[in-house]
Image (cartoon, rainbow, N blue to C red):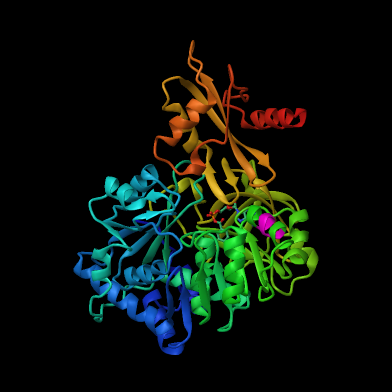
Amino acid sequence: MSTTWPTEFAARYRAAGYWRGQTFGALLTALGAAHAGRTAVVGDDARWTYAELDDRAHRVAAGLRDWGIRPGDRVVVQLPNVAEFVAAVFGLWRAGALPVFALPAHRETELRHFVTQSGAAAILTVGVYERHDHAATARAVADRVLAVDGAEYADLAATAPRGLPDPDPAGVAFLQLSGGSTGLPKLIPRTHDDYLYSVRESARICGLRPQSVYLAALPVAHNYPLSSPGVLGALHAGAKAVLAPRPDADTAFRLIEAERVTITGVVPPLAAAWAQAAARTRRDLSSLETLQVGGAKCGRELAERIGPALGCQLQQVFGMAEGLVCYTRLDDPAALVLGTQGRPISPDDEIRVTDPDDPAVEVAPGEVGALLTRGPYTIRGYWDRDAEAFTPDGFYRTGDLVRRLPSGHLEVVGRAKEQINRGGEKVAAAEVENHLMAHPDVLDAAVVGVPDEYLGERTCAYVVPVAGAAPSGADLRRFVRRRGVAAFTVPDLVRVVPEFPVTGVGKTSKRELRAALTAHATKG
Ligand code: OOB
């Protein structure tokens, strides 16, 4: 289904020791033996040792097979931050199935897209969580649904473990979701070999050791808390992974104190909220060594506040589910930690910074250009194909505008692609526009990002009504919400205008719309 690395690249990545021929199931077996009695995962009401996690994942794998899941089957996993996420995902891996990582915020429209695009055999989810009945939504979309808090799953997880054939480590292990630049998220095929390399190196770069404690504050299915270094990096190091049910400062600080958390990762708006809350908390945060900030640009001013406010070190993370992840290193000078988004994991991450108007031309060192990348853990194609995102020689067009420093560190200065980064949640302008256009009173819609103090950006939808109609912003927001989409897909602001500014060739000029917004904002 998906494009893979050319043979000569695969051979090179193996020879360099990046791809080691180990599956995630085999990794857990090794960890279960090496760290048997140590705590692996702490969730809401679970606290499992490595041996327990290993045993549970074996049982879940056998149970899933008996339930009818075959090797190669895709299974959409929509779980909040509960311990069962870890057992279920390792269980799926051992059963040879491919998890498709949905986020808890996704609703019917997104789930249906994932099921259809991946040809999923089932959905693994929860019942009611945070006031939403996930199992009911899943049943509207797929015939086979398992809720991890239900009786059927409890039986399945009690199945006697048995040996199952290990899947191909070079094969696709799971499908991750793209930030969604051109519509609904695209599916990203990651292999055991490539992902394990990024996890292993991330754990090393972030200084993880068996005594480390990683807190997953963000939704754990996302690439960042999953693998950068995330829960998988923590397990790889024999450390403890703690899953926070919510990312707010109260919840996180309680867990940092109780579990002696040493490292966690957040998006910039959360970092700002935590920094503020830290000033008046009575919680003991002294165990915290590193706060990672990533997913969206962390401005200089915020970067400077983090260390002093939380009494820890800042690490910037610039990554993408398609592969490439950059980190500021723990021993980098302050100027780089505060002013850049880090440098790539691998010496074999190839970086091209090109003229935004002419991708064939690389800009001079230090100039801003569009970032293209190719390497041992960056995909060569989407599962659901989209050749446009890749150059003929296999570079992924990230859509990000960056400046590269002589040290190799990248400074992210903006985005070339039409995506609004709502506090790390990527909202595709095209997707919101499509929903609005479905309204009978809407002639045209254009969605742009508007600067927001808390989220970094919020969505603003400009709407041109059909002649004679006068829909209100509240009507349109309600309309989009009722289409069963993630809350972040509902536009934050709606402006009804008689017409759009257009570019030379007659395309809606989002640049002018943004300018109009800025002018509006400064006028107050
Ligand atoms: C992470 O992954 P995605 O796939 O949700 O989003 C990727 C996009 C990047 O192309 C970039 O536009 C933006 O998110 N981004 C940043 C950033 N980190 C991500 N923009 C500016 N500064 C940063 N530090 O968001 C992701 C995946 C793995 C690790 C960390 C983040």
**Residue 160, can we see it?**
yes
Q: Which corner quadrant holds the N terminus?
A: bottom left
Residue 499 falls left or right of residue 90? right
> Which image quarter: residue 334?
bottom right
| Figure check: 327 above or below 396 | below
Q: Looking at the image, which is closer to me, 438 or 260?
A: 260
Q: Which corner quadrant holds the C terminus?
A: top right
| Residue 353 point in image, percent of width and height | 66, 53
Q: Main secondary structure of the magenta part?
A: helix
Q: Quick check: which quadrant has ligand 1?
A: bottom right
Q: What stretch is highlighted in magenta?
A: 271-275
Residue 516 falls left or right of residue 441? right
Q: Looking at the image, which is closer to me, 208 or 188?
A: 208
| Residue 229 point in image, percent of width and height | 56, 70
| Figure check: 130 above or below 498 | below
Return the residue found at the far top. Answer: 468
| Figure check: 181 above or below 518 | below
130 part of magenta stretch: no
| Residue 331 point in image, percent of width and height | 73, 75
Return the residue found at the far front. Answer: 282
Task: Name the residue located 45 percent from the left edge and 33 percent from the top edge.
Answer: 480
| Residue 388 point in image, percent of width and height | 48, 45
Task: Name the residue located 46 percent from the left edge and 41 percent from the top edge.
Answer: 183
**Residue 325, can we see it?**
no
Tally the marks.
0
Residue 413 falls left or right of residue 133? right
Task: Name the residue located 23 percent from the left edge and 79 percent from the top edge.
Answer: 160
